């Protein structure tokens, strides 16, 4: 299951449960492209539940579409990751260390409200 969460236009907010499909990735990239076209800085809220894989078909095309984002990393602001799985929280912390100029925070599911408020710019 994939769901886009309605929030401010400079925030990409998604909720993913189960398997991530190529269609999910395309929708996420479409929303990110829209947010980046309209805003200098884009913030990301990603909530995952019981992720059990990613669809392999078309993955190369999605990687190619996402590759230009490496040149735009300075346009990402706050990134909140809400995850029920320890391995996702751990990978996010590693990614945060590799990209120190992006402000990352990792949250447990019971803190999803605080995570969304923080990524929207309401420090708490």
Image: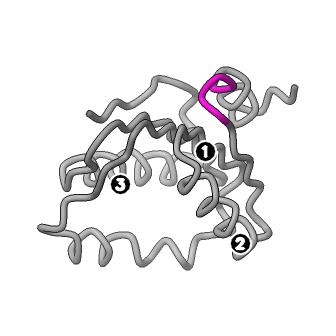
How far is disc 1 from disc 2 in space, using C-alphas?
15 Å
Left or right of residue 101, residue 113 in this image: left
Q: Residue at x 45, y 26 (%)?
A: 5
**Which mark, by number, is residue 99?**
2
Query: Which segment is the magenta one?
Result: 108-112
Q: CA distance from mark 2 to mark 3?
A: 20 Å
Reply yes or no: does residue 110 show up in magenta.
yes
The C terminus: image quadrant: top right
Q: Which residue is mark 1?
A: 81
- Residue toward you, 42 or 90: 90
Give the residue at the far right of this rendering.
124
Residue found 55% across the figure and 41% down from its top:
83
Q: Main secondary structure of the magenta part?
A: helix
Label 1 vs label 3, nearer the camera: 1
The answer to whether 65 is drawn above or below residue 21 in the figure is below
56 in relation to 76, above or below:
below
Q: Secondary structure at mark 3?
A: helix
């Amino acid at each position: 299951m994939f769901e886009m969460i309605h929030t401010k236009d400079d925030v990409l907010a998604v909720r993913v449960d189960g398997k991530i499909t190529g269609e999910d990735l395309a929708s996420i990239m479409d929303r990110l492209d829209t947010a980046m076209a309209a805003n200098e800085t884009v913030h990301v809220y990603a909530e995952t539940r019981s992720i059990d894989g990613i669809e392999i078909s078309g993955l190369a095309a999605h990687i190619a579409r996402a590759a230009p984002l490496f040149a735009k990393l300075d346009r990402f602001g706050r990134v909140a990751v809400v995850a029920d799985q320890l391995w996702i929280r751990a990978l996010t912390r590693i990614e945060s260390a590799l990209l120190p100029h992006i402000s990352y925070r990792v949250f447990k599911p019971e803190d999803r409200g605080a995570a969304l408020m923080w990524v929207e710019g309401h420090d708490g």
